Image (cartoon, rainbow, N blue to C red):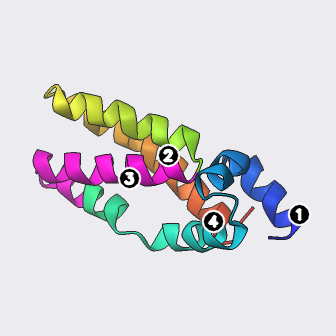
Amino acid sequence: MEQNRWDALQNAGIDLPDALRRMAGNTELLEKFLMRFPEDDNFGILGRALDGADWDTALIAVHTLKGISGNLGMGRLCQCCCRMVEQLRAGDTAGARASYNELAGVYRALCGALKGGV
């Protein structure tokens, strides 16, 4: 990965050294997973589940997104997901809906950076 791209992704909030450590130093593997991240369906599934008040599906989707974002060094997104997981597990659906707005903003910014929008 070229240095300018590396810097742009780090500026977008991706802890690339941490993510690279999780990938056993394999830069090509990390880049492959980062570029596939915007194609993952869990964000869309989460939004549809919240719209339909399908709390079980929402919990599964946000929990999956939490794991993916954590492994890819997306700390802020992972924190947003953690908060939503806790809210959904506690039955705080109003809190989860409110948290979704922040999560969506962070998610979209990361996807923009990954697609070269930074």
* Helix, strand or loop at mark 2: helix
Marks 1/3: CA distance?
A: 27 Å
Q: Position of residue 108 (x, y in %)?
A: 53, 57
Q: Earlier in the sequence, mark 2 or mark 4?
A: 4
Marks 2/3 in contact by CB < 8 Å: the verdict is no
Q: Is residue 91 above or below residue 1?
A: above
Is the stretch drawn in magenta largely helix, strand or loop?
helix
Q: Is residue 72 above or below residue 76?
A: below
Residue that mark 3 sits on = 65
Name the residue rendered at 28%, 36% in the picture.
Answer: 85
Marks 3/4: CA distance?
A: 17 Å
Q: Position of residue 3 (x, y in %)?
A: 89, 63
Identified by mark 3, the residue type is: Leu
Query: Is 47 part of what is drawn in magenta?
Result: no
Residue that mark 2 sits on = 70
Image side of residue 3 versus residue 101, left or right:
right
Name the residue rendered at 60%, 54% in the picture.
Answer: 109
Label at residue 3: 1
Marks 1/2: CA distance?
A: 23 Å
Which quadrant holds the N terminus? bottom right
User: Over which residues does the magenta segment extend?
Assistant: 48-72
Q: Earlier in the sequence, mark 2 or mark 3?
A: 3
Residue that mark 4 sits on = 30
